[in-house]
Image (cartoon, rainbow, N blue to C red):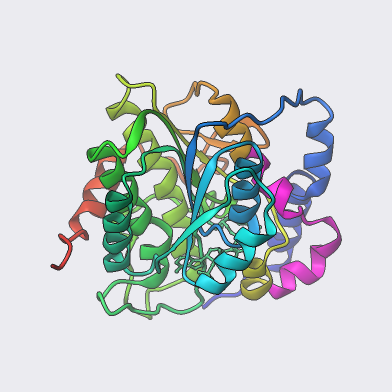
Amino acid sequence: MAKTPLTKIIKFYIRFTPSYSAIGYHIRSIFWKNRPNNFQGQTWLVTGGSEGIGAAAARQGAEGGAHVICVARDAGKLKAFSKSVRSQTPISYLTADFSRTADVHALLAQIRQSGERFDVLIDNVGIQKHQPVITDEGLETSFVTNILSHHLLVKTLLEEKILKDDATVIEVSSGGMYNHRMVPEDLNITDATRYLGSRAYGLAKRAQVMVMSYWREKHAHLNQKFYAMHPGWVDTASVNRSMPRFVALLKRVLRDHEKGADTIVYLARERPSQKRDEAIWFDRKERNPHIYAHTPDSSVHPQDVVNKLNSFLTPPAH
Ligand SMILES: NC(=O)c1ccc[n+]([C@@H]2O[C@H](COP(=O)([O-])OP(=O)(O)OC[C@H]3O[C@@H](n4cnc5c(N)ncnc54)[C@H](OP(=O)(O)O)[C@@H]3O)[C@@H](O)[C@H]2O)c1
């Protein structure tokens, strides 16, 4: 694989560090008007809600009065997190591994049985791999974890009206999508010779933005809101694991978890209207999902991405 030239790396950090680090957050937040969070009476579902950005959003939702249900793989970590939050209604939790659609079907079965309906859904689980790891369902792990499982969740919750008619859906995407033009055929690359972890991640993250655009148009007759956002650069466990050199370089200016979750909580609270068909929210503002000339492609539509995702979905095994 060709090495990225040093000048390109330097240009990248000069361009993005002031904005995506805590520096950008501090400067922008001077101009924000902060209203208190009031989520009384709401029910939230947060994927990847036991640590990092998802946990910070879940905590603020619960402290604002919502009944929050967090989903992750490790029940012990979920339990410890739930106990650490002092809220009127304790945080509940369910386990599922988002790298397996069978697990998402099982999660959906539990949700149906509970009779819960959701005001806010935060699709936050996200991972980056260096090599393709193929799941027992024959799919590439980061593709399923980052987009396919979330698509299955949103689609089913909408179809079964478990998401209320005035629900808010928030996809936690990433600035990692900016460098990648959407090629739906490449969302699930299982061949190691064609696989690049950052591209698999970037395509899934761009797909999150496009899928939100699809649902916004399809459900325009309802008062539902669909957003994709990115949190900036946040000092979390997964970033420490997957990008140790990046963390070593920028540790002192990375955002903390609350700053990473700020735009998620803002969107849940304010439900702002979105002007663009396709946008990514960052630091409480709607932004262009394309910053490089090579990524827009007028021949690829949100419907194409949804069709591709649907082609990987199979009915639950009974
Ligand atoms: N941190 C950043 O700088 C940054 C930048 C841009 C975008 N993002 C995005 O922000 C989101 C959150 O990232 P983070 O940095 O906060 O991650 P994190 O701190 O590593 O938290 C990950 C959460 O997801 C859960 N999780 C991981 N794999 C899972 C799986 N297969 N199934 C179910 N749950 C799983 C973890 O719990 P278990 O391990 O128990 O499952 C944990 O609750 C991701 O979508 C990421 O792409 C982060």
Evaluate whether residue 287 shows in this view.
no
Q: Seen in the image, is 150 located left or right of residue 124? A: left
Q: Is residue 251 magenta?
A: yes
Camera-side residue: 242 or 187?
Answer: 242
Dividing the picture into quarters, in which one does residue 118 lie?
top left
- Residue 305 place in picture, x, y as percent: 29, 47
Q: Seen in the image, is 31 located left or right of residue 82? A: right
- Residue 135 place in picture, x, y as percent: 32, 77
Locate the C terminus and report the quarter of the image it occupies.
Answer: bottom left
Q: Residue at x 37, y 80 (%)?
A: 193
Residue bounds of the magenta highlight: 244-263
Quadrant of the rendered image holding ligand 1: bottom right
- Residue 101 place in picture, x, y as percent: 29, 64
Camera-side residue: 163 or 25?
Answer: 163
Q: Is residue 86 magenta?
A: no
Dividing the picture into quarters, in which one does residue 247 lie?
bottom right
**Above or below 67: residue 14:** below
Q: Residue at x 65, y 67 (%)?
A: 239
Q: Seen in the image, is 9 located left or right of residue 214? A: right
- Residue 277 place in picture, x, y as percent: 42, 27
Q: Residue at x 50, y 61 (%)?
A: 126
